Image (cartoon, grey):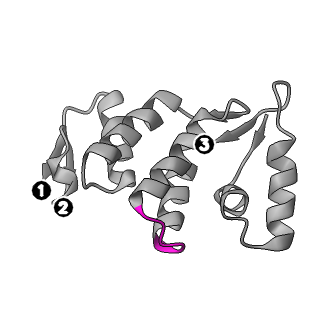
Amino acid sequence: MIGLDTNVLIRYIMQDDVAQSKKASLLIESLRGDRLGYFSNITMAEVVWVLESCYELNKQDVIRVIEGLLKAREIKKENSELLWRALQLFKETNVDYSDCLISVISSNDGCTETFTFDKKASKLSGMTLL
């Protein structure tokens, strides 16, 4: 298994840098059952942030990217179930993806509530405005 950093995934998704995108594509397209790729929850949060803030992708396009990454069988995720739950919250709410991910991870790890100063995030179950 090999780790995939945010910038490798971004180059593969966006195909915006000829040299780096080619390398990222060759790497990702070479993944298979005996040589899986891997990314962490942090990497997914970074990918979403970069797509929204640097590339100004709309929410529906970001959702399609997340779904594509989560469905990729050649890529193992740190915790696929939590990433899917965060995606569902992201779809259903007006809350940032990273806050959705924080909420589901905290809940999964036994937190009865997670305190935040973010008014939008506090609307999620288990998140409490401080």
Q: Quadrant of the N terminus?
A: top right
Give me the residue at 52% from left, 31% from top: 79
Q: In this view, does 16 lie above or below 85?
A: below
Circles 2 and 1: CB atoms closer than 8 Å: yes
Q: In this view, does 67 lie above or below 22?
A: above
Q: Position of residue 97 (x, y in %)?
A: 38, 52
Q: In which quarter of the image is the C terminus?
A: bottom left
Mark 1, Cα crowd under 10 Å, few <14 / some 14-19 / many 20+, is: few
Q: Where is residue 18 in the image (x, y as percent from the top left)?
A: 83, 72
Q: Which of marks 2 and 1 is nearer the N terminus?
A: 2
Task: Decide if residue 36 is on the left or right side of residue 76.
Answer: right
Start-end of magenta stretch: 53-58
Give me the residue at 33% from left, 57% from top: 96
Give me the residue at 53% from left, 66% from top: 50
Task: Decide if residue 78 is on the left or right side of residue 28.
Answer: left
Q: Earlier in the sequence, mark 2 or mark 3?
A: 3
Q: In which quarter of the image is residue 8?
A: bottom right
- Disc on res. 69: 3
Q: Is residue 74 above or below residue 25?
A: above
3D distance between C-alphas at marks 2 and 3: 30 Å
Task: Decide if residue 14 is on the left or right side of residue 43.
Answer: right
Q: Is mark 1 on a helix, strand or loop?
A: loop
- Disc on res. 130: 1
Q: Quadrant of residue 69?
A: top right
Q: What element carries label 3?
A: helix
Type of amino acid at the residue the image marks with label 1: Leu
Q: Position of residue 27 (x, y in %)?
A: 85, 49
Mark 2 sits on what residue? 117
